[in-house]
Structures are given as structure tokens and as C-alpha cells.
Image (cartoon, helix red, strand yellow):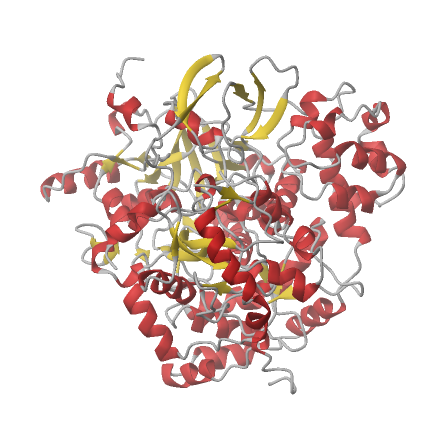
Amino acid sequence: MKIIDGYPDYMMESIKLVEQKREKNLKIDVPALTMEGREKVLKAYHPDFMDSTKREVKLGPNKGEMIYNGIVDLLESKSILDTKSVDLTKIHYDVDILIIGGGGAGTVAALFAHEVGGVPKDKILITTKLRHGDANSMMAQGGIQAADRPVDSPTIHYLDIYGGGHFTNKPELAKALAMDAPRIIKWHLDLGVMYDRMENGEFQELSGGGTSRNRMHSAKDYSGMELMRNIRDRARNLEIPVLEFCPIIELLLDDQGIVSGGIAFNMETDEYYVIRSKVTILATGGSGRLHLSNYPTTNHYGATGDGLVMAYHAGANLKDLDTIQIHPTGDAYPEAVVGILSTEKIRGLGAIPLNKDGDPFVFPLEPRDVESAAFIQECKKGKGLVTPTGMPGVWLDSPMIDIIHGKGTIETKLAGEYRKFKRFDIDMTKHPIFVYPTYHYQNGGVEINEKTETALPGLLAAGEVTGGVHGKNRLMGNSLLDYNVFGRRAGLHAAEYIKTRNVGKLSLKHIDDYNKKLDELNIKSDIKAPILLPEYRGKEVLARALDIL
Amino acid sequence: MTETDVECAKQDEPSQVTATVEIFIMGKRYDVPIGFTIMKAIEFAGYQYIRSCGCRAGFCGACATVYRKGQEQKLHFALACQCLVEEGMYLVQIPFVPANKALYDINDLAPEDNTILTIYPEIARCVSCNTCTKSCPQDIKVMMYIQNSLRGNIAKAAELSFDCIQCGLCAMRCPADIKHYHVSQLARRLRGKYIDPESKELNARLKELEEGKYMDEVDEMMSMDRDIILNLYKKRKIEAQGDLDEGADA
């Protein structure tokens, strides 16, 4: 097999068809699907509609409800924490606010609790599994939505969110998302975020899938990184305490059943810390590294759904985990980057998906679930290509962008993408990129209300770990918005909540009870949860591993 | 489609191992499959990451790696998640970069010529050796933005440094002990906050929201029956389809 410009020869044959038809394709508009058309392709091809991808959970608040298999596997496993090895009489950290997770939502919550809520910094503690800022927040590329143009309004944004979520969102959460958005952008500007601007100072705003107005604010294709590093820099300047490489593995309740902190695990020394708090904010993010339905993922290394597990052990209910978001344009070639995201901004700038014959087959900016299902359908129909390592996929005709917007657009507006492919000898200004859906976002999670309260007193939650904001499908640009809007609300509410809170005697009895319930139901599992990290070590090595040190 | 149809798509499972290359992880020899990134190869060899692995997609700077190939003189710099293994690599990852960050309140600063120099005076020690630039896995012109910071050209320093993922390799190599990535963070914040122009449209929308506009509209929508809101949704004009070209809707 010969490699030409980064692609194997047989794929290059297909690229020739793409090139021949490019001029014609630039003039064709594939219309958006009707609601009925969307439903049809979703039901036939989206993993959310397959029986084999999920099952009923046998215990806990969501007993009898359908949830993705990989999550049920965790919920039906015993706790990783042996409660007998923990001494709760010795408190290692005694704070007002424990924030579990040092990504976007957790850091924003800390800033608002401290700067607006007036909580002293030493009364706040962020614990995080990896480094501060190692989170999906850092990886978001495309941008953040906010209705600030005269042709747009928060009302139209609300309608996009609610319809995009198939009318399953909690309306009060969708409202908060739309209405708070402009003030979040203003807060970012005050921090020093460099958004893409036009010469007159207005934002360069693009369309995203399922949005009816151009309202995506971006910072090249490093939008998430630009937001996260500004927010983190503010937290560092204010010296908000952060414990890195110390994930919380279980929540603590007090004798009233109110969440009162958690047990942290130092992954480098294997010791535990007892953290007592007046209020706890769950901001652990998503679960891409569970590879639900066997999809590759765009998520960061620590996205293993820990927050879902510990909240469920303590009695919180989950919502909409019968759906996941697969993002249509995961990289399917080269093998080294399989599953990594190619941003929706590529389609926002005008690139269109094409099959192996170089023909368009779907409106490029359908909501993500619909667009993904259409890609899968095209591959099932035999109109996709398969890479040398067996990955199916379709083309995304990136060179169209420079034709539409002028030479150099890709290198400036999609600097990260351009760099990524260049590392593998693929020049996306000359050749299309090859894509297939990848597990991107956990639509649902721990149910919250507009104050970020969960069903458990003393436990607030914000960001990807929560359920209700996006319903059963999230629109692009609304996750960066989500962690800002609800991180802020969590921080402000936490600052109020602690004023009247007295913590009782700490307890881990709920863990023992949960384990006992599993025994009673005779549910067996090979794993313990939360898992904290995915297992990627070589199979041959694991087969010979000895448990000695 | 059944579940098995996407099994081939699962990430991080070594696909059929056909050919291997010899690499040396901290001096120890391992055979790893061709076509793997350094990160996947290290895992294949049996290491489980705690440090030096973050987003796995080139955005977080956790996996800064240095290597030499065989008897080569030159030291190379890469991100383990973005660089393929090559025969004879001797490699190590940098788990942490000790680089003190200045503490400041961005609200108390002004974008003056000497603002950055005042907060990070060590940039004046730059000897223009360009080692920082050569060590950047993002190919950023690091020395150029330090020189621009020194001259007070904040906007240019911010622009040149924008793609920085803060891996810290520049700071580890600098003979003048400059912490470049902290310097550029300050430059970008100064630009974003003080130099880039105001958005009049955003300010107008904020004023409307302060006055309570849209509250009733959204509340009305929230109380609509499903059929009615579904119909509204279906009838939306889509800007990306050119629906607004003949005049905006309400």
C-alpha cells in the first residue's frame, strides 16, 4: 500500500472524485431534514435507539430505568472504598465548600463563591483527579453560544436548546442557559479572554449544528483552552487551594443524611484524606473514557463518570443517561488520532460531508445526533470508505473553507486542526479529512434544578456531570456555556447555603448499605467503582502482571 | 446496526500488531507497534499513566516529552499524544515543570509598555538564543513573543503566543530562567481585557437583560403545550440556510 500525501493510495482515489466534484458541490445546498426525516434516521442508526446499548439498572433511585450498559456496570459494582479502612474521627481538611473536580465548572464555582459570595479562599478546596484544568473544558474547540446580535435573542436561543434536546430538557435549566449567556461573555472579557473579533469590535459569530442563528463565539479553534486558562489563571492569582491527583472517591454524609464532604485518594501515595465541608459541589465532568457502546472518544483521560457513581451511592437520582452524544466528526484516520475531535467549526466555516463518490448526502449542520446518524447510515449503505485499520468513515471537504473565505483561513481560524493533521503529513487545506462519529458528551447525569441543587441536601452539581440542561441531546457551543452558567450559579448558591449549615457526625454507612443491597440482589461484578482511570495497558503485559508491590 | 458494528472503532485498543519499532522508555528497551503515538506505545509497553497524560489530543500540555534518536546529537521535543514512535527513540516525559508564576490582579493593571516587564523583570535577561522556540512542540515563535513583551508590544506578544498549551518545555530550557508561558498568559489577558475593542451589540443586549426584556417571552414559551412549541421550532428561520436574507424574523 502506497501512502500519498498522508493517505493510502485507495483513499486517494476517492479524494480525486471529491476534488473533481468540489466546484459543483460548492453550489449544491442539501436541505435540512424535516422533523420526520430526523426521527427516521435517528431510529435506524443512532446508538441511543439500539436495544443492545443499554439495560435497566437493578437498584437505587433510578431502579428499572434504562441507562447505558457501561454506566450500569459501574452502578452495579461495589465501592472502591473499603469503609473499614477509614477513620472518620480525624479530619484532614475542614472547609466550607468542597469542590470535586478542577475543570471548568469547579473552577468557575470557586471564583464566584469567593469573589462574589465572599467565602474566604481558605474555606474553599478544589480536589481534582489530574492537574487543575485537565478536563474536557480545556478541549472544546468550536466555541460558546450567547445570543447577543440584534437578529438573535435569548428567546430564540431557548427555542434552539429546547428543540435540539427533543423537548426533553428541564425548561427552567434551558432558560437559565439562554438568559445567563450574554453576562458570561462579558465576564470572560473582564477576565481577559481573547475572542475572535471583527475590526469594529463585534464578535465573529458562526453557526453550529441545530442553531438557527450565528451565535457561536470562538477563540480560533482553541476556544475551550482559552477560556479554561483564563479562568484558571484567575483562580491561581487568588490562590484558591487545589489538591491535584487527589480524586474524591466517595461522598460523606452526616447523621442527618446531608452531604458533608468526601474521601479523597492521593493517587501518588495511596493515602486517603477525610474532607469535611458544609456544602459540596460535584463537578467531575463526563464519562467518555467508559467507551459506551464501544465508541472511541474525544474526552480527556480522567473522564470516567466518577461523579455519577458516588452521587448514586449516596442516593442522588440520574437523568437522561439513556442517551449519549456522539459527535459526527471524530477523526477516523490516521489511526494515531482515531476518536479525537475535528471541530464542528470546520462545517460552520463551510466544509461539507461527502461520501466515497464525492457526493453530498446530508445538510452539514443538523443537530449532532442527526448528523452522526446520517454518517453511520451512509457507511452502512456502503457509501463510506474503510481505513487500513478497519475504521469506517466519510470525507469532510476542508479545502472548501479557503475557497469560500479566502486562502489562509484554515491556518488562522483552525490553527489547532491544521497543526494536528500536518503532524501526520496531511494538509487539510489541500485534501479533505476523514471522519466518523465518536463519543463526545454525556448528555445526562445527576439531576439538578436552576440553583444547581441535586436531590441530596448539601450536594450541588454543575457541568457535564449533571442532567436536565440539555435533555437528550446537547447543541454545540452549549457545553462551555453550561459549565460557566451553572458553575457560577453553584458558587453563588453555595456561598448562601453555608451560612445556615451545621455539620453533624460524619458517616460512610450509605456505602455499606449499597454494597449490602448488591449482595441481597445477588448482583456480581468484576470491577469496583468509581474506576478513576481507564485501562489501556497492553494485553500481553496485563496477562503476566503480578500484584506484589 | 448492532453494537458489534462499531467495535472496530474502539479507541486505544492496539489494532493488529504487524510490525514493531524498538524504543527506549527511560533507558529500558521495548518493542512497540509502528503507527502508535508515544503515549499509546508507553501504555502498550505496560505503563499506566497518572501524570504526564491529560487530554490525549494536543490541548493540555501534560505529556511534554524529550527524546534523542540513536547516536543523534540533537534533543527533540514533542507531545506524547501527538507524535508517532520512531526506531531508536530514547525518551522521557516531564511530569511537572517548576516555574513560579507571578501573582497579580488583572483589574489593577494597565496595558502599558512596561507592564509585563514590571511583573516579569527576568524577560530582560533574554539573550536571544532562540532555544525556547526550538523546544516548542507547537512551533510557536517563543523568543519573538518574549522580545515583543520586552518592547511593550502586548498585542503582538498575545497574538504570537495564542496557541501555547503551557507544557513548560520553553521554561525548562531557557538559560536566562524565563518562564515564558506565564509571561504570555499575562500578555493575552492584558490584550483581551484592555486592548481588544468593546462589543456594542453585547453591551446593548446586557442592558436589555438588565431591564428584564425577554423574561416574559421565555416564560411564555416555557408554558406552551408541546404541539405549539414544536410548531414554532419547525418554523424557525435558519440563518445558515439564508432564511434571514430577505429580512429578519421576530
Q: Residue at x 21, y 59 (%)?
A: A51
Say which quarter of the image contains residue B78. Answer: top right
Asked if residue A472 lies left or right of residue B130, the reply is: left
Q: Which quadrant of the rendered structure holds the C terminus of chain A?
A: top left
Picture coordinates of residue A203, whole percent (x, y): 70, 63
Pick the front one: A55 or A446:
A55
Q: Residue at x 34, y 64 (%)?
A: A377
Asked if residue A377 lies left or right of residue B245, the reply is: left
One can see residue A91 in this view: no
Picture coordinates of residue A317, whole percent (x, y): 30, 54
Asked if residue A202 lies left or right of residue A318, the reply is: right
Say which quarter of the image contains residue B50. Answer: top left
Q: Which quadrant of the rendered structure holds the N terminus of chain A?
A: top left
Pick the front one: B201 or A294:
A294
Pick the front one: A48 or A121:
A48
Position above or below: A385 against A512? below
One can see residue A15 in this view: yes
Pick the front one: A55 or B90:
B90
Q: Residue at x 31, y 64 (%)?
A: A45
Picture coordinates of residue A393, whole percent (x, y): 41, 55
Asked if residue B116 lies left or right of residue A36, the reply is: right
Position above or below: A25 against B76? below
* Number of numbered tags placed on the structure image: 0
Position above or below: A193 against B239? above
